[in-house]
Every structure is written in structure tokens, then in C-alpha cells.
Image (cartoon, rainbow, N blue to C red):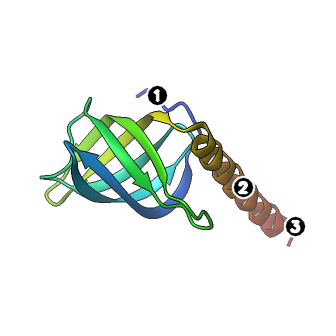
Amino acid sequence: MQDRRLGYRIPFEGMVTSYVHDRPIRGLVSNLSDTGINMSSISMLAPPPGQLVAMEIDLPGVDDSIWASGRVCYRKDDRMASGLGVRFIAMAKSQARTIRDFCIEARRKNLGSLLARIRA
């Protein structure tokens, strides 16, 4: 199986509100990169692959919400929830920079804690 992700994803737990046909749908984010997110949503409300969605993402330590539009690239259903892979297709440059900086800082912290455990 080929990994088609464009960016390295970091573990991230948070909330996202996606808007499908102007209807808000809450979801849980499990990982994030500067090119997309992986999220879970209630199966009967989750958009199908190919669907364009607007998203509002809250990042810790960031005052304003990140607004982006994305395309659902992947959907895996079970009885209660659907796992969705969403690739960002448009957002303001300043918000794209905020996500990129957040991901870089999270990777740096993770690497620092790994190095500290190795040295101990």
C-alpha cells in the first residue's frame, strides 16, 4: 500500500468543526500536518471521499481558529464513527504558516524528549 501523504503528520488530539453543505459536523483530530488532518466523525454525518469541506481547527496556544478548506481523500467506516483523511486545499498564508510552525515545534519537542530518554 502506498502512502500518498504529502507531509509528516504529528500526533495531535483536538476538536475540529467541518462544514458540509453549510451544516456543522464536529470531529476529533488524531493527527495533523501542514498538508492535512486525520479525523473521526459520526458515520452517518461523515462526508464521502472527494467531498470539499470547510474546517475550523483549534490549536493549543493559538488565539484564533484556523480556517481551511479541504478535500476528503480517505474514509473508513465502522458502526459508530468514520475515519477521514482530509488534504488541505486552501487557507490563508498566515494560517498555513501557523500550522507549519505548530507542527515543527511539536516535532522538535518530541525529538527533544526522545533524546533526553536516550541520554538518561
Name the mark on residue 105: 2
Report the side of 1 relative to 9 (left or right): left
Residue shown at 20%/37% (left/top)? Answer: 48
Residue shown at 59%/41% (left/top)? Answer: 96
**Badge 3 is on which residue?**
119
Name the mark on residue 4: 1
Counting every numbered tag in the picture gives 3
Amino acid type, label 3 = Arg
Report the side of 84 relative to 36 (left or right): left
Report the side of 55 relative to 93 (left or right): left
The quarter of the image holding the N terminus is top left
Q: Is residue 81 above or below residue 55?
A: below
The earlier-in-sequence mark between 3 and 1 is 1
Amino acid type, label 1 = Arg
Disc 3, SS: helix
Q: Position of residue 105 (x, y in %)?
A: 72, 55
Q: Marks 2 and 1, Cα distance to the nearest angstrom? A: 24 Å
The earlier-in-sequence mark between 3 and 2 is 2
Residue shown at 58%/65% (left/top)? Answer: 63
Q: Quadrant of residue 57?
A: bottom left
Q: Position of residue 106 (x, y in %)?
A: 67, 57
Residue shown at 85%/73% (left/top)? Answer: 120
Seen from this angle, which residue lies furthest bottom? 120
Amino acid type, label 2 = Glu
Of tags 3 and 1, which is closer to the observer?
1
Mark 3 in CB contact with mark 2 (< 8 angstroms): no
Q: Position of residue 52 (x, y in %)?
A: 29, 34
Q: Quadrant of residue 79?
A: bottom left
Disc 1, SS: loop
